[in-house]
Amino acid sequence: MPQATPGKGTENTEENQVKEFTFNFQSNRNSTEHVVRGKLDESIHSALMSSTSFQKEQEKNEGKTFHLIGKRELRGAINLGMPCKCLPEKTHFEVVFYRVKGQVSYRDEVSTGKRCVVFCVRSTGKTGGKLRTGSKPIVKDTCLREDGHDLCVYAFEGETIREALRKDGRFSPVIEQNVWSLVDEHRCLQFTLTVDDLRDKCFEVQVSNERHAAGNENGDGNDRAGPKKRQEQGNAPGEQEKLKGELRKQVDEYLGKEKGEKHSRKNWNLLKKEFGKIAVDGVPITVHEMLVRLSASVGFVKWDNNGNKGTASCFYLGNKYILTCFHVVKMAVGDGVPDNEWKTIIEKAVTISFDYKEKHQPTWGWYNIEPWFEVYNQSLDYAVLRLKVPNDDQSELPPGVSHTANSPPWNGVIYIIGHPQSLPKSTDTCTVIPIPQRNVQYYMQVFTKYSFKEIQNSDTITYNTCFFHGASGSPVFDSSGKLVGMHAAGYQYPIGTKRNSVIEYGPTIEAIVNDMKARHPGFDFISQIQDDRNIPCQDQGEVPMDIQ
């Protein structure tokens, strides 16, 4: 990033000093540069919103958000909370509108009396340590990374590097969870150092596989944890080691066939470190009660289309509408069917029950589907179907799951309720796999040649689950019972005659709701499925969860 000399205010008194910058729109790069003036301690976002030209363009791009890309004096995507006093003279930006792919947040703090430091960080980091496996996603918004924009970060003098990136708002949880450094051609700076000498420089984030210990700002991982803490983290010997030994033996037998004993143990260590499912010994009874309430809305999908039979899962939204995966409907319809015939086959072949809780399927309480198929998205893998209800009497239908566009959790525990392997309704407690840990192709070459590209965006939530065939369309809830996603697919590998889980995923409910509003404006999602009885919130490869 070129050396930038801070600009001077255009007024004499400090209280009335202003800073001037210009902008144009990406859609019309040859347009006149629009001038904006803001007070020194005013945020760039606040100053920009005062521009009539910007307001008009924003109205044209309703439903979209925007990035402000520095093109002159400052370079890269600007944090919109940055005070105007940080800007050099003659700073020019390009406004880029785009569809929201996740929640966007910016640092916004009072800067009065504080001196700012502005520096640049590459939008894609790299891994460090022994593995050195290559690039590392470090930003929440994939648009920035895909377009190759660097991030222009501001901080206040005296802050640590870690504080600056944590407060920026645009970086992924890996900045919070791992040990990392800032590197350039000549230096490697630990995140515990201050930002004071970073002004006008550009760096790359180098992330290690070491987890950052809370309260330990020396970047030394877990070395200072006591015996009890190390045992909780799985470092002390005990019953877990016996289980690991048994599992290691199974995996080694499989891996050792082609790669040899030494290679197989190396990959086993990587596998258990990156994808080992966390065991939870106790579940509060209030959670069980919550899951029982939520399970009432989960349905069993069954189809028989001229000998083409199968099962899956779904959940009830309200007002006769259910949500399931697009690939479930596609399998029920079969190959070679014209689009205009899908709804006819769906009506004849598909039935749904919400009462399959015992060993034998119920012979009553089955609902057919209306010949309606209008709201779906194949790439996001969701489809809305409408139940046939005799005499339009909805009193026997279950309560609908709240359809609020909840953001998925970055980590922690989630719950899936569905019908895996055509079995009665059941629940699985899962561990979320954070976005930074989704880049698994480097570790799993022994298992697969695929790139895991389906899970490399913020429209999906990833986790470990035992739900395989028949579970597609199952709702995914967070720890407080909020609907956050829909189970869709996963990667598996065989050990003997059994198939085992590597990572599973599904579209987030936030992405589904946003897509419905954008792609199906004629379908009023909010009012159509509003229901006063909604439940309150108290070989190897990628395969859908209901086929072999």
Image (spheres, helix red, strand yellow):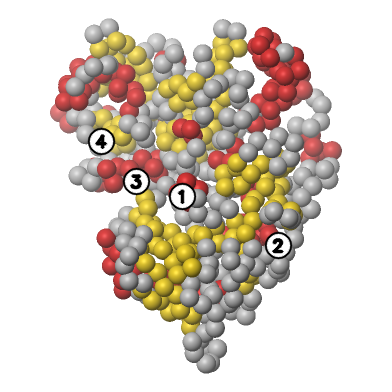
Q: Nearer the N terminus, badge 4 or badge 1?
A: 1
Residue drawn at the location 57% of the way across and 47% of the way down: 124
Q: Nearer the N terminus, badge 3 or badge 4?
A: 4
Quarter containing the C terminus: top left
Q: Nearer the N terminus, badge 4 or badge 2?
A: 2
Is residue 186 among what the camera can see?
A: yes
Secondary structure under the numbered disc 4 in the rendered image:
loop
Q: CA distance from mark 2 to mark 1?
A: 28 Å
Q: Are marks 4 and 1 in contact (CB under 8 Å)?
A: no
Q: Which residue is nearer to you in this view: 473 or 43?
A: 43
Name the front one of labels 3 and 2.
Answer: 2
Q: CA distance from mark 4 to mark 1?
A: 31 Å
Quarter containing the N terminus: bottom right
Residue drawn at the location 25% of the way across and 12% of the way down: 305
Q: Nearer the N terminus, badge 1 or badge 3?
A: 1
- The amino acid sitting under disc 2 is Thr
Q: CA distance from mark 3 to mark 4?
A: 13 Å
Q: CA distance from mark 4 to mark 2?
A: 49 Å
- Tell me how many marks there are: 4
Name the front one of labels 1 and 3.
Answer: 1
- The residue to which callout 1 is attached is 147
| Category of crowding for the residue at label 3, using alpha-carbon neighbours closer than 10 angstroms: few (below 14), some (14–19), many (at least 20) | some
- The residue to which callout 2 is attached is 160
- The amino acid sitting under disc 1 is Asp
Q: Position of residue 162 (x, y in %)?
A: 68, 57
- The amino acid sitting under disc 4 is Val
